[in-house]
Image (cartoon, rainbow, N blue to C red):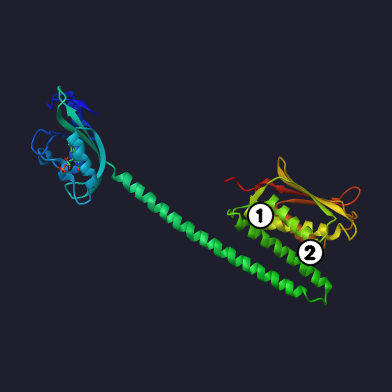
Amino acid sequence: MTMPSIDLDRTHPFAEAMRASSIAMVMTDPTLPDHPIVFANDAFLRLTGYSLLEVMGRNCRFLQGPDSDAAAIADIRRAIAAGVDLTVELVNYRKDGSAFHNVLSLSPVRGKSGEVRYFFATQVDVTDQHRQTDELRHANLALAAALETATTLVHEIDHRVKNNLQMVSAMILLQSLDRSDLRLRDSLLDTLSRVEALSTVHHRLHRSGDVSRFDVADYVRDLLDDLVGATGRTDIRVRLDLMPVLVQAGKSAALALLFNELFTNALKHAFPPGKPGTLAVSIAREAACIVAVIEDDGVGVSPTATRLSTFGQSLIQTLSRQLGAETTIGPMSPSGTRVRIELPLAIVAAPV
Ligand SMILES: Cc1cc2nc3c(=O)[nH]c(=O)nc-3n(C[C@H](O)[C@H](O)[C@H](O)COP(=O)(O)O)c2cc1C
């Protein structure tokens, strides 16, 4: 910005405008010894705390002090020598000794024949912006530290929960080795499968890197793989039509237990040895709910009887209630069983 040479006469409108400006401004005369201030406006006096008498005739370096950046000062020196514009930021000091961050913009003011007549500069105090940046940086550091603590805690809890579930599984397994009571052994093995379903949920949540959402379709796929694999049967076909559904992590345990109960039951009772069949599972999103359907073409149940144990039935009821779900179990034609679960959309995790 090269301004025309101006007369500093009080009555000149440019001089008046500069005087009245709320931006600190000075003019210096490079033709005088030590390049002194020849004009300073009130905003400059307010910013620096000096009186007009104290600043007139002095080189602006009196504003510098111990924290003024030597490289910025060298830049100013070069710009003045070259007669070019420059904007730099450096620490300056007020008369009372307090420091402020000054964004200094200076330009040569040339005379008619192009010679540098004056230098004109504005000073903008950006201390507040620095303070805000510092505060933000501190807040960010504190947040990062808090996040690290929380992550460590989550990992620690993950580790402990995993170990505890493993211990519970091991204890149930040990107890189930006692063959003196076969009914007790069967129900212990059912419990073991439930604990393992919970373990898998826990493992999946922590492995995914997002402990807040749980992918139901992925879980169902893996669970069926494991359960069908464990039967050792090659004549049970699995047909899946699963829409990806992410549910809130808080609902994952109940949902996993519900599926585990229904799948285990179908695999245990629908296909007696020598009876091949298909287990079909679909998950779809409808207008007001998520619908999961589990169908088998196995031996089926009579309308009055149920193949579910009393505990299994009440577990399904309790889990459905916890999820706000409607679970209906009925026969399939010509044979088999169909379970329909209507899950409320409220359990779906919000998108990130
Ligand atoms: C118009 C003008 C305004 C200046 N304003 C400031 C200022 O507000 N703060 C500052 O630290 N230096 C300011 N300077 C720079 C110093 O006056 C001086 O040029 C600088 O310290 C480099 O020279 P030196 O090495 O001789 O000190 C200004 C220079 C000019 C020409």
- Label 2 Cα crowd, 10 Å radius (few <14 / some 14-19 / many 20+): few
In this rendered view, identify the residue nearer to me: 277 or 335.
277
Alpha-carbon span between mark 2 and mark 1 = 21 Å
Residue at numbered disc 1: 251
Q: Are marks 2 and 1 in contact (CB under 8 Å)?
A: no
Could you tell whether 129 is left or right of 297 in the image? left
User: Which disc number belongs to residue 283?
Assistant: none
Q: Position of residue 166 (x, y in %)?
A: 66, 68
Amino acid type shown at disc 2? Phe
Q: Position of residue 65 (x, y in %)?
A: 19, 49
In this view, 53 is above or below 276: above
In this rendered view, identify the residue nearer to me: 240 or 293.
240
Could you tell whether 335 is left or right of 239 in the image? right
**Which element type, helix, strand or loop, lies under badge 1?**
helix
Q: Quadrant of residue 122?
A: top left
The mark nearer the N terminus, 2 or 1, is 1
Q: Residue at x 59, y 45 (%)?
A: 351
Quarter of the image where ligand 1 sits: top left
Q: Quadrant of residue 5?
A: top left
Residue 164 in view in this figure: yes
Residue 41 in view in this figure: no
In this rendered view, identify the residue nearer to me: 114 or 154.
114
Amino acid type shown at disc 1? Lys
Q: Residue at x 15, y 29 (%)?
A: 116
User: Which disc number belongs to residue 311?
Assistant: 2
**Which element type, helix, strand or loop, lies under badge 2?**
helix
In this view, 125 is above or below 135: above
